[in-house]
Image (tube, rainbow, N blue to C red):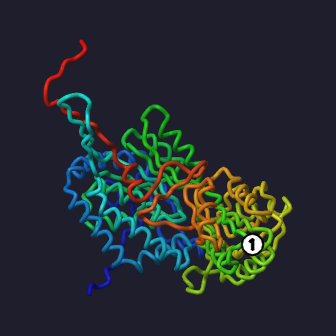
């Protein structure tokens, strides 16, 4: 039985080109616990020179790493998984401290980050080439699959460990190098803990760097830099569109994988099990304070059951325990920062101004917001059309299934979605009509499995993560033909 390892130290440093050190900007940033404002670490931020150094080291290290045996890269991922298991409680606690996660959300996140590493362990053996037929006598067409090179990863603060490792683990397993820029609100869980894990697992120096710096200082430069062949970004639609433009502006065309905002609908059809649907809606809306791109942002209920559903939903929401995320009884912790808090205050005021009825009036203590539930919500109001990213729940009544589908698709987003019904075939047929990348029948919209395609339509992004889909994104094909015997040419 292995002993509990010593906790990681030195998490106040950057990890650049294999070295733990301060950034060169000279500017410091406090990483704070969003619940009590405790300073968890103070980081001296990176500048453009640090970005240059990280990319240079990645280029150098990747050439040899691409030639490593599949068994070497797979073994690295196996060690990463083992470290995740050995340090599980330590990693969970960091997620709680840095992002305000309740225990259940932190467990989910660490498990998801661990599982994508386990999936990635198989990737070196799944880089399949092909031999294709030719109409030219004596010609052989070979299609090789190769790593892209260096991949830039930009991750958000809400599920930082998982949403960073979702790109880092596959990229490394496939023979690429990575430079990771985590969000300023979550540099430890979004990057520095991963750097510690991969370093402990024996990843060769330079293959992974973590640079923490202000977006205004290094953000555009990180994307426009000539080195990365791909930019993987998870975050807001507004920022994602800018990154897409920068990555394809003609100077250095790059591949992009963008997982952006969501306005995920949960549709409760007239034959749904109301109690089950309420359970699904409560978890889908309020898990991690609603700060999840897949969070149920709109709850669309058939008119025939709307009154009973609303009564049960409000009752359940009113009993959720709000407060310190380290308390095992807590269901809802703090929002991440004051900017988010102020934005949610404004959304509450605007919802009332636009005619929504406050069926449950929550409260705000510090950064902890207890649930607000709104009825009589206009489907064209900002509460219905905008991504809330907080514990605000709009209930929208649909006259019938046809209107429910129209309301579900009445959004510029198309990430996740869900539908509740006792008729499985009806649920699947309805799901296939929703314009989204993911739809779940009789389950919440917050779902992710490491082997299933994750991504959205419309303003929710481009590309797919996980499994064979991320393998395709992070590798390239190279057609090499061999003419075994001479043949005549037209000139």
Residue linked to disc 1: 372
Give residue 216's position: percent from left, percent from top: 54, 47
Instruction: Name the residue rendered at 46%, 74% in the picture.
Output: 94
Give residue 140's position: percent from left, percent from top: 21, 35
Give residue 111's position: percent from left, percent from top: 43, 73
Residue 136 found in image quarter: top left
Q: Which quarter of the figure is the N terminus placed in? A: bottom left
Above or below for 140 versus 370: above
Residue 397 vs residue 247, the one in the foreground: 397
Query: Helix or strand or loop: what does disc 1 sit on?
Result: strand
Instruction: Name the residue rendered at 51%, 48% in the picture.
Output: 462
Q: Which quarter of the figure is the C terminus placed in? A: top left
Residue 341 vs residue 347, the one in the foreground: 347
Left or right of residue 139: residue 382 = right
Residue 108 vs residue 343, the one in the foreground: 108
Left or right of residue 441: residue 48 = left
Above or below for 131 versus 455: above
Left or right of residue 282: residue 301 = right
Above or below for 82 versus 237: below
Report the number of numbered marks: 1
Residue 235 found in image quarter: bottom right
Q: Residue furthest left?
A: 485
Instruction: Name the residue rendered at 37%, 45% in the picture.
Output: 52
Above or below for 221 versus 100: above
Give residue 341's position: percent from left, percent from top: 68, 65
Instruction: Name the residue rendered at 26%, 61% in the picture.
Output: 203
**Mark 1, residues whose alpha carbon is within 10 Å: few (<14), some, or many (≥20)?**
many
């Amino acid at each position: 039985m292995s002993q509990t390892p010593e906790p990681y130290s030195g998490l106040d440093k950057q990890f650049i080109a294999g070295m733990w050190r301060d950034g060169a900007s000279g500017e410091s940033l406090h990483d704070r616990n969003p619940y009590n404002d405790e300073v968890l670490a103070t980081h001296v931020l990176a500048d453009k020179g640090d970005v240059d150094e990280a990319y240079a080291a990645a280029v150098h290290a990747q050439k040899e790493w691409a030639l490593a045996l599949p068994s070497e890269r797979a073994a690295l991922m196996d060690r990463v998984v083992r470290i995740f298991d050995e340090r599980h409680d330590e990693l969970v606690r960091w997620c709680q401290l840095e992002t305000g996660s309740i225990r259940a959300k932190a467990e989910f996140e660490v498990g998801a980050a661990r599982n994508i590493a386990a999936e990635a362990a198989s990737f070196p053996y799944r880089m399949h080439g092909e031999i294709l037929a030719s109409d030219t006598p004596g010609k052989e067409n070979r299609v090789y699959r190769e790593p892209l090179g260096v991949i830039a990863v930009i991750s958000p603060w809400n599920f930082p460990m998982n949403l960073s490792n979702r790109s880092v683990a596959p990229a490394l397993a496939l023979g690429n190098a990575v430079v990771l820029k985590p969000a300023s609100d979550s540099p430890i869980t979004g990057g520095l803990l991963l750097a510690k894990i991969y370093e402990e697992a024996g990843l060769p120096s330079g293959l992974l760097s973590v640079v923490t710096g202000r977006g205004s200082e290094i953000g555009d430069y990180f994307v426009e830099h000539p080195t990365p062949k791909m930019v993987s970004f998870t975050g807001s639609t507004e920022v994602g569109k800018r990154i897409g433009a920068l990555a394809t502006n003609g100077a250095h065309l790059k591949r992009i994988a963008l997982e952006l905002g969501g306005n995920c609908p949960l549709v409760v059809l007239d034959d749904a099990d109301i109690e089950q649907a309420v359970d699904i809606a409560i978890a889908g809306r309020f898990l991690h304070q609603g700060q999840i791109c897949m969070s149920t942002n709109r709850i669309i209920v058939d008119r025939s059951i709307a009154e009973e559903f609303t009564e049960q939903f409000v009752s359940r929401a009113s009993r959720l325990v709000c407060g310190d995320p380290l308390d095992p009884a807590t269901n809802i912790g703090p929002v991440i920062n004051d900017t988010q808090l102020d934005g949610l205050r404004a959304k509450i005021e605007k919802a009332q101004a636009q005619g929504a009825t406050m069926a449950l009036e929550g409260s705000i203590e510090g950064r902890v917001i207890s649930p607000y539930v709104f009825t009589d919500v206009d489907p064209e109001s900002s509460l219905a059309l905008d991504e809330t990213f907080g514990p605000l729940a709009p209930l929208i009544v649909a006259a019938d299934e046809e209107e429910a589908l129209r309301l579900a698709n009445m959004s510029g987003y198309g990430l996740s979605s869900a539908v509740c019904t006792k008729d499985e075939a009806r649920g699947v047929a309805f799901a296939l009509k929703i314009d989204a990348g993911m739809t779940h029948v009789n389950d919440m919209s917050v779902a992710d499995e490491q082997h299933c395609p994750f991504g959205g339509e419309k303003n929710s992004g481009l590309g797919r993560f996980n499994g064979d889909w991320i393998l395709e994104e992070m590798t390239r094909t190279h057609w090499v033909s061999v003419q075994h015997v001479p043949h005549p040419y037209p000139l």
